[in-house]
Amino acid sequence: MVRRTRRAVVILYRLENIVHKRLALFAVAALPLAAVAAPETFSFDPLHTSANFAIDHLGLSTIHGRFDKFNGKVTFDPAAKTGSVDFVVDTASVDTNDRDKGSRPRSRDEHLRSADFFSAAEFPTMTYKSTQVVYTGDTPTKIEGNLTLLGVTKPVTLTIDRFRCNSATASAKERCGGDASGKIKRSDFGMKRGIPAIGDDVTLTFGFEGDKE
Amino acid sequence: MSDLLNHPAFQGAVAPFIVALIVASALGRTRFAWLAILPAYATMVALDTGFTLTPLTASRRSWLIALLAPLVGVAADSYRRSSRRVAPALAGAAALVSLWVFWTLIGNREGWRSAAVGAGIAIYFAALVAAVLRLRDDGLRCGAAGLGLGIAVGIAGIVSASIGALVAGAALAAASGAMLVVQIALARTIAPGYTGALPIGMIAALIAVGAQQLAELPWYALLLMLLVPLAASLPVPRPEVRFARAAVLSLLALVAATLPIAAAWYAARGAPS
């Protein structure tokens, strides 16, 4: 009886060892996968990132503008096909290449900062937060998210027109970049001044680069 | 038709003037004639931005208060028009309401700057509203002050990069001008009471502070606007011809209005873009 019990204990002990070893082996084998699957975070490089917009003027031409101050982060995980984009724009930094007001009392950029358009004193920032990043294969191709402008939040989809990463080298971190674009109706956000002489449809374009953190 | 409705001159001047003229003519024999300011201003809001209230921005709070002011004026006239306490109480209430209207802008500043801006706005509202309320027994003086203030905040507003201020100021000037025309046409002076004087003071203060906070109007232009109701209260001969008296008072108010406009122009010329 005692022998049988000892034998059973030994068998159980061996089984436990085998299970532990296998689990340990499985965990070791899974480590590289986990490392690959970890989401990668990139901070926008302001020197190589731009937030731009284009809008119709009198049906004659397209006025192009940009925001000089912004910051944000991108994370993406190609293995899990997930990611996120957070982008904060300083609305007072709007720039439509109209710095010299000449004989006019105010420049176009000053007007854009007023309550007629961006109301920068009341709404100093415009934000974009993604809700989903859509992949085609291993490449992110679409960002679905919410744009908050003038206190109004609306869903806006950005198409990633191009996305590429350069591998890290001895002298540089891994770097990714791309171009994204989308369209909004500014009246949806309560910015109605000047419609239709100044278009309602606004094209947003972003060029972005960032180093892996 | 769409081009006409979208034109700032129609939205701010023509449409509010016609509406004020019709309503004031219809109510000309009653004590509610100065209520015409309400539909006139509402017409401007409807054509310019619409009545959306969300999100409740400073601009939207501004027109909401502008539209409520005549009704508060009617209540004040109905309650105790002769009491000396009503005018100071309304000026004080205007000061408190101004803090609510511009709360987000005051809150966007830090520390003592927030308190200083809030106090400055409240004191300015109390001062301008009190200055206009002093004219509440004289329809021609009050109309002239409204005309001058509307033109002052409108032109100073556009010089300070705000078309919204121009359109709103034009609506105030148009409604006040219509009240002058109706008084001349009916050959009787219609005392505005609080019904007319309160909205004129409130609307002028709302547009002026809005242009200063949300556009580029310099703070000292706000102080110069206080001279407009003071100019409209200057002693003038009382000729039998109402038109002449209205013209002289309007001229005085308009001369005073050139000062804040000049200040806004001076600031614009000197400021970097």
Image (tube, coloured by chain):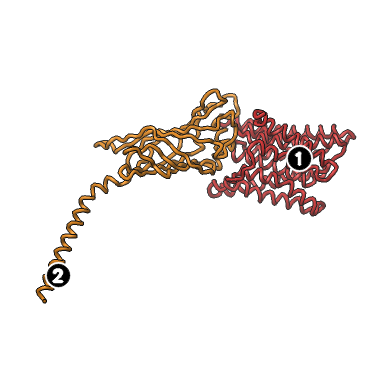
Position of residue A18 relative to residue B158, above or below, is: below
Q: Residue at x 38, y 38 (%)?
A: A44
Q: Position of residue B197 (x, y in %)?
A: 76, 44
| Residue kind at label 2, given as amino acid type | Val
Residue A193, horizontal then vertical, whole percent: 60, 34
Q: Quadrant of residue B62?
A: top right
Residue farthest along the top direction in this orientation: A60
Q: Which chain is orange?
A: A
Q: Which mark is residue B230?
A: 1
Residue A159's quadrant in the figure? top left
The residue that disc 2 covers is: A9
Q: Chain of mark 1?
A: B
Element assignment for label 2: helix
Q: Which chain is red?
A: B
CB contact under 8 Å: marks 2 and 1: no
Q: Quadrant of the N terminus of chain A?
A: bottom left
Instruction: Tell me the amino acid under the disc marked 1.
Output: Leu
Q: Residue furthest left?
A: A3
- Real-space Cα distance between discs 2 and 1? 104 Å
- Measuring 20% from the left and 56% from the top, which residue is drawn there? A24
Residue B187 shows up from this direction:
yes
- In the drawing, does residue A103 fall left or right of residue A34? right
> Residue under mark 2: which chain is it in?
A
A37 or B209, which is in the foreground?
A37
Residue B157 placement: quadrant: top right
Count of labels in the image? 2
